[in-house]
Image: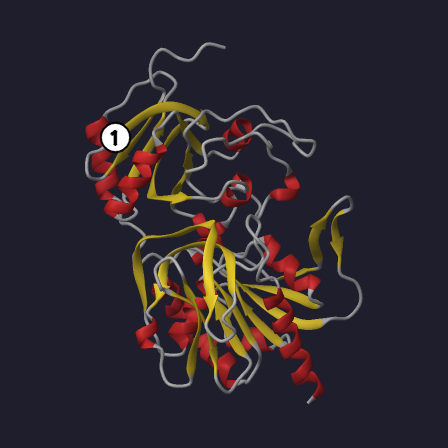
Amino acid sequence: MPAPSRPTACLALADGTHFYGRGFGATGECVAELVFNTAMTGYQEIMTDPSYAGQVVTFTFPHVGIVGVNPEDDESAHPFAAGMAVRWDPTAPSNWRAAGPLAGWLERHGRIGIGGLDTRRLTRAIRHQGAPQVALVHDPAGRFDVAALVARARGWRGIVGLDLAREVSCTQSYRWDETPWVWPRGHGRREGPGLRVVALDYGAKRNILRALAQAGCEVTVLPATATAAEVLAHDPEGVFLSNGPGDPAATGVYAVPMIRAILAARLPVFGICLGHQMLALALGARTVKMNHGHHGANHPVKDLESGRVAITSMNHGFTVDAGTLPAGVIETHVSLFDGSNCGLRLADAPVFSVQYHPEASPGPQDSADLFDRFARAMRTRRAA
């Protein structure tokens, strides 16, 4: 099929810069924050990660679509990223696990894609401007009012001060027992009694819950707005604070009091990404907005206590200000890209968290042992 003679999609930045390209997926318009992701694989997992709510993702790797999509790789019930921008138009699937093409999947879920962009130029714009606000439109007829799109991008409220965890969280509690995918069996199931864990869903990826189940945890997932009384009513042996989107300070309005009550109960606590940031807030530290954030599957992180360096998967636009960590809270990990905080622990309690994603999906599994560390803390407390 020949390429269209004129653009069918337009991406307009708040500074007036705009890019024309070829639209795919759903038609229509969205307004969001623009970020870039450097991962070479895992576009489906990235698009379905609730942490990307309110964002259009620019993929720096040019070839997207070749492995297609399939239900096993979804990290949530549907895509949460508002849209995607890529260098080349999505290729036809060529993978034995593919159940359909990327473009059709995006269309079914109402998500917009734009191809044919100079993603290197777009990435430089993100780095220089700091995750700009954008309007993305896909119109097969190629009708674009660029001035109006720029105005809509400028008029969007942005991520700062926005509580998105409440919007992406589950609305009622549920149990989880599925374990990670293993070839050739696929996903498994944890059986028998396990370590009782309550997971607070601020936008939890499925593979995090699978990793907890794999570590021997009997997982009960509660909504983001759950109170300490509701958490403790399940008699947990440990509490997990999940990843999620938005401004941690906004979510912390209701989450921080709950976390402080859990800390007072002296339970083991493990946090990832947004959960890490809100644990820091509960301990008295501050979070700040980053220029363009960390989004990718190749981020080196140093463990300050062991000297070990791990390659990690990251997705966050806010960071913990390490200079505000109070006495008794130890900084455990830092980014080797920019020195930003990537982990903490309490000196006198089994409480720890990391900014990156040890469950990968997509990304390396260098830090998967953190789930076992959480399980060991609960077993030690059980045996005491």
**What colour scheme was applied to this rendering of the protein?**
secondary structure
Q: Amino acid at mark 1?
A: His
Residue 258 in the figure: left or right of residue 222: left
Q: Can you identify the residue that label 1 sits on?
A: 18
Residue 136 in the figure: left or right of residue 170: left
- Quadrant in the rendering for residue 330: bottom left
As rendered, which of 163 and 323 lies closer to the eye?
A: 323
| 59 lies above or below 174 | above
Which residue is found at the position 52% from the left and 67% from the top?
308
The picture places residue 56, in percent across and down from the top left corner, at 38, 40
As rendered, which of 308 and 153 lies closer to the eye?
A: 308
| 94 lies above or below 327 | above
Residue 235 seen in the current view: no
- Other residues around mark 1 within 10 Å, as few (<14) / some (14–19) / many (≥20): some
Which residue is found at the position 51% from the left and 79% from the top?
262
| 141 lies above or below 134 | above
The picture places residue 105, in percent across and down from the top left corner, at 55, 31
The picture places residue 57, in percent across and down from the top left corner, at 41, 41
Residue 49 seen in the current view: yes
The picture places residue 2, in percent across and down from the top left corner, at 45, 9
* Tally of numbered discs: 1
Q: Residue furthest right?
A: 192
Quadrant containing the C terminus in the rendered view: bottom right
As rendered, which of 308 and 236 lies closer to the eye?
A: 308
As rendered, which of 184 and 53 lies closer to the eye?
A: 184
| 86 lies above or below 308 | above
Q: Residue furthest bottom?
A: 384
Q: Secondary structure at mark 1?
A: strand
